[in-house]
């Protein structure tokens, strides 16, 4: 009897343990079930994922060298605050004014990226995001502590180190040289902050990321969120009538989730994001603010990306945004309906699109919509358009997209 | 190791005290709550030794602050910070002035003790001082009189200064005490944050009023926690925390006040013991003098100012059961040693053997001696305080004359025989 009980206990424990090792790492903006599926596929040597994961493993070795992950080392452009720990990026579409001797203030050419971007911190923050999400995922997939260790080191260097840690604000993000008014647009760069936190979540059960580390990063995030919600720039971005306003909410949702403030997450979703669906989408399902851009199809897709990601975060608290229709009849699915024909035939897009549209983005958008709405037509269309998998995890999570 | 030992001693005494007085209600952050209570009782009993000063204080508060337009960092702003955000607090370093030999006058050069008149172009300096005195006066009046109108006015002013989305100060002091043309980031401007501590003190005092709502409280707590993050992690904050003179001591007072308003009492105790007490050991000489302050052109003022910082720390420490006046470092340094060093010059400032290019106000010595006497049960100090006497000039009606008036009420017993 006693022996039997012991055996039973053993079985129970092993079941629990195996569940634990497969259980979804609770990320912020990714679909946790897909992460679990990817791990099963990888563990079962599924040919759809193994080559991709192996490529990522190989290329991730570069993150182990001593390359700095911070905005202080080798800084080329320092903010007017004189503090190298202040994040600074250039507003992408702004250029020196050829009519002015010193080029100031810069003027806008929508859709044309200024190469001076590289002299600021934007590239670095996207590298941070890629490095920590990649290493965090590799830790989850392989269980090797070295990935968690490196993720932890990079996160600490970027956020917490007293000499190199980024100040918790983006006052100088998407800066426009010579411009005297304050803008809120730079907060869009904070998407990378939110994504980097996915990396922190993925290593939470590692000995290299203890509760003290987590608490310190949560404090950073709290201070950053305070800045986002209370600063003049935050107020301005809150009022943005285009994709910026959406992302502003989604970043706030993601950060609120990271600091365990579920009430705030819910409040942003219900009191702000849903209202933007009403105010930004027209009766055709399009987003007129994005149609007015020189890259209209790209930006219309960017808005869908935003809602998709909002849904991933909302799902952590059990809310499905796909099921939400506003009193005016606006919804994500209406948005998909509007762009659907142009994903199949981008050349028929009746608005501006001054650079070619990346068709894989349409494929991914349709595939996710197809799954969410249980609509075979979208899934078939996604496969017809074809999805080129990229060697990154966000892409690999949808490894089944090209299944026949 | 030594610090650890001190820590345990303090922790033990704190636990001991806490167990006896776990239900002591915290009234304020910066004041000795026992003094506040005794003033209130005296007023309720119509005690003639406090009533004239109380009536005068009421009149002053009514006439100067009750109808005052709320102040903010945005109000009448002439100079905006390099961030271009009017909600960033910006002031000029008082003792730096344009270099007459340099083109454009930059970088500025230092003239200790001589105020640069340009300082007044940056209104936040005066406005933050007035604001802190206003809300503390109103809050003290509210506490003493229990009249809601004072709490309402204080609440209105606190909201405009901290919480309003158009006028509310950003929770940093990156541009405080700026020196034009200087490339280096300095921490010295954080000394201005004493006024923030004062304002939080007022917010704490009006907590019982319906005028200061749960929402206000939560929002100001968020502000305080965000400011705390800046104090603890910014380049400015990290530098000021290391300042070897009174700036380091005042940094910790503000830090303590902010942490206390945020409600993290355990951490509060830790920073008092691990951050503030070691500064006494490091800054003080065996004779109780503070060499960094002696070197100033206002040596007696700054030496007293440093001890006032520690006394403020002690007021806060008292809320969590610590007594800094009774602390003695292993190398013998203590607040009392510092007090002993200054005592003769508080009695006879003209005998001060170092520089003091302006007159010294002896009231400050009397208050410190009286407090030390109370905190360490030393009658001699109290006698000495009475001998020097506390005779503040409260005839002024300037909005910056609040502090001596509040002290007249808190220390109404000081001149009693």
Image: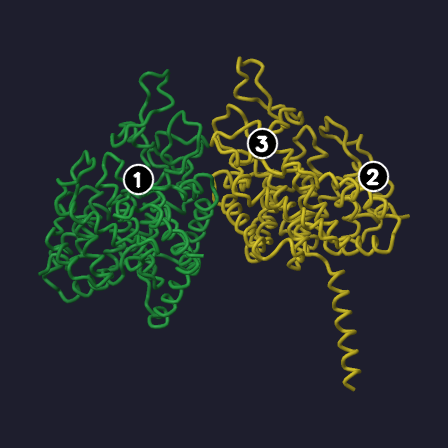
Q: Which residue is mark 1?
A: B292
Q: Position of residue A149 (x, y in %)?
A: 67, 49
Chain letter for the part of the structure drawn in green = B
Q: Residue at x 65, y 45 (%)?
A: A195
| Chain name for mark 1 | B
Secondary structure beneath dot 1 equals: helix
Q: Position of residue B211 (x, y in %)?
A: 33, 57
Q: Nearer the viewer, mark 3 or mark 1?
A: 1
Question: For the residue carrying disc 2, how many other residues have a C-alpha within 10 Å: few (<14), some (14-19), or many (20+)?
Answer: some
Q: Which residue is mark 2?
A: A388
> For residue A11, which quarter of the picture?
bottom right
Alpha carbon distance from label 3 to label 1: 42 Å
- Return the residue nearer the eye: B403 or B301: B301
- Whichever of callouts 3 and 2 sits on the residue coming sooner in the sequence is 3
Q: Which residue is mark 3?
A: A89
Q: Is residue A242 left or right of residue B237?
A: right
Chain A display color: yellow
């Amino acid at each position: 009897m006693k022996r039997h009980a012991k055996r039973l206990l053993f079985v129970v424990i092993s079941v629990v343990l195996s569940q634990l090792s497969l259980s979804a790492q609770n990320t912020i903006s990714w679909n946790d079930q897909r992460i679990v599926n990817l791990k099963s596929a990888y563990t079962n040597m599924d040919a759809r994922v193994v080559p991709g994961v192996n490529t990522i493993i190989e290329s991730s070795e570069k993150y182990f060298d001593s390359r700095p992950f911070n905005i202080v080392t080798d800084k080329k452009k320092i903010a007017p605050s004189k503090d190298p720990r202040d994040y600074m990026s250039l507003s992408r579409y702004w250029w020196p004014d050829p009519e002015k001797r010193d080029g100031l203030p810069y003027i806008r050419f929508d859709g044309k990226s200024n190469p001076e971007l590289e002299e600021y911190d934007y590239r670095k923050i996207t590298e941070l995001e890629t490095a920590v999400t990649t290493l965090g995922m590799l830790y989850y997939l392989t269980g090797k502590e070295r990935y968690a260790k490196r993720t932890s080191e990079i996160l600490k260097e970027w956020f917490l180190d007293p000499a190199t840690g980024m100040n918790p604000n983006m006052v100088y993000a998407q800066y426009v040289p010579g411009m005297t008014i304050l803008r809120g647009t730079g907060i869009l760069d904070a998407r990378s902050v939110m994504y980097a936190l996915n990396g922190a979540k993925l290593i939470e059960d590692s000995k290299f990321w203890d509760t003290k580390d987590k608490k310190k990063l949560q404090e950073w995030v709290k201070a950053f969120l305070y800045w986002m919600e209370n600063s003049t720039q935050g107020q301005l971005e809150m009022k943005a009538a285009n994709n910026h306003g959406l992302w502003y909410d989604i970043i706030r949702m993601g950060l609120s989730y990271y600091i365990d403030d579920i009430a705030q997450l819910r409040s942003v979703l219900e009191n702000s994001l849903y209202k933007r669906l009403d105010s930004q989408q027209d009766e055709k399902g399009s987003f007129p603010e994005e149609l007015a851009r020189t890259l209209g199809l790209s930006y219309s897709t960017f808005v869908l990306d935003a809602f998709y990601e909002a849904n991933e975060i909302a799902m952590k608290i059990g809310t499905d945004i796909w099921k939400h229709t506003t009193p005016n009849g606006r919804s994500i699915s209406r948005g998909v309906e509007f762009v659907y024909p142009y994903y199949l035939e981008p050349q028929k897009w009746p608005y501006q699109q001054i650079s070619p549209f990346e068709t894989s983005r349409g494929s991914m958008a349709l595939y996710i919509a197809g799954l969410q709405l249980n609509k075979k037509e979208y899934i078939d269309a996604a496969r017809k358009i074809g999805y080129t998998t990229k060697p990154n995890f966000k892409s690999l999570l949808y490894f089944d997209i090209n299944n026949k | 190791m030594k610090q650890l030992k001190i820590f345990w001693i303090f922790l033990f005494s704190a636990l001991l005290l806490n167990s006896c007085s776990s239900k002591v209600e915290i009234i304020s952050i910066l004041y000795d709550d026992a003094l506040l209570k005794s003033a209130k009782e005296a007023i309720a009993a119509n005690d003639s030794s406090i009533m004239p000063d109380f009536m005068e204080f009421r009149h002053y508060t009514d006439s100067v602050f009750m109808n005052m337009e709320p102040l903010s960092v945005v109000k009448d702003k002439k100079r905006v910070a390099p961030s271009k955000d009017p909600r960033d607090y910006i002031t000029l370093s008082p003792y730096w002035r344009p270099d007459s030999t340099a083109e454009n006058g930059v970088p500025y050069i230092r003239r200790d003790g001589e105020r640069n008149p340009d300082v007044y172009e940056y209104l936040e300096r005066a406005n933050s001082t007035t604001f802190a005195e206003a809300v503390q006066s109103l809050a003290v009046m509210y506490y003493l009189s229990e009249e809601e109108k004072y709490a309402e006015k204080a609440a209105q002013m606190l909201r405009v200064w901290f919480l309003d989305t158009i006028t509310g100060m950003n929770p940093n002091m990156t541009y405080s005490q700026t020196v034009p043309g200087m490339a280096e980031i300095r921490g010295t401007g954080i000394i201005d944050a004493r006024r923030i501590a004062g304002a939080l003190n007022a917010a704490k005092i009006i907590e019982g009023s319906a005028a200061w709502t749960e929402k206000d409280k939560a929002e100001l707590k968020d502000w305080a926690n965000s400011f705390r993050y800046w104090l603890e992690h910014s380049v400015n904050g990290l530098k000021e925390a290391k300042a070897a003179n009174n700036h380091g001591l005042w940094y910790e007072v503000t830090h303590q006040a902010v942490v206390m308003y945020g409600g993290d009492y355990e951490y509060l105790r830790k920073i008092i013991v691990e951050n503030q007490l070691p500064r006494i050991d490091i800054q003080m000489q065996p004779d109780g003098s503070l060499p960094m302050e002696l070197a100033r052109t206002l040596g007696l003022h700054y030496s007293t100012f440093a001890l006032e910082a520690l006394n403020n720390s002690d007021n806060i420490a008292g809320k969590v059961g610590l007594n800094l006046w009774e602390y003695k470092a292993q190398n013998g340094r203590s607040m009392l040693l510092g007090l002993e060093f200054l005592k003769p010059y508080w009695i006879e400032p003209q005998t001060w053997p170092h520089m003091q290019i302006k007159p010294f106000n002896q009231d400050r010595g009397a208050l410190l001696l009286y407090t030390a006497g109370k905190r360490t049960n030393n009658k001699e100090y109290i006698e000495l305080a009475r001998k020097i006497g506390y005779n503040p000039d409260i005839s002024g009606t300037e909005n910056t004359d609040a502090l001596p008036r509040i002290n007249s009420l808190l220390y109404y017993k000081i001149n009693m025989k």
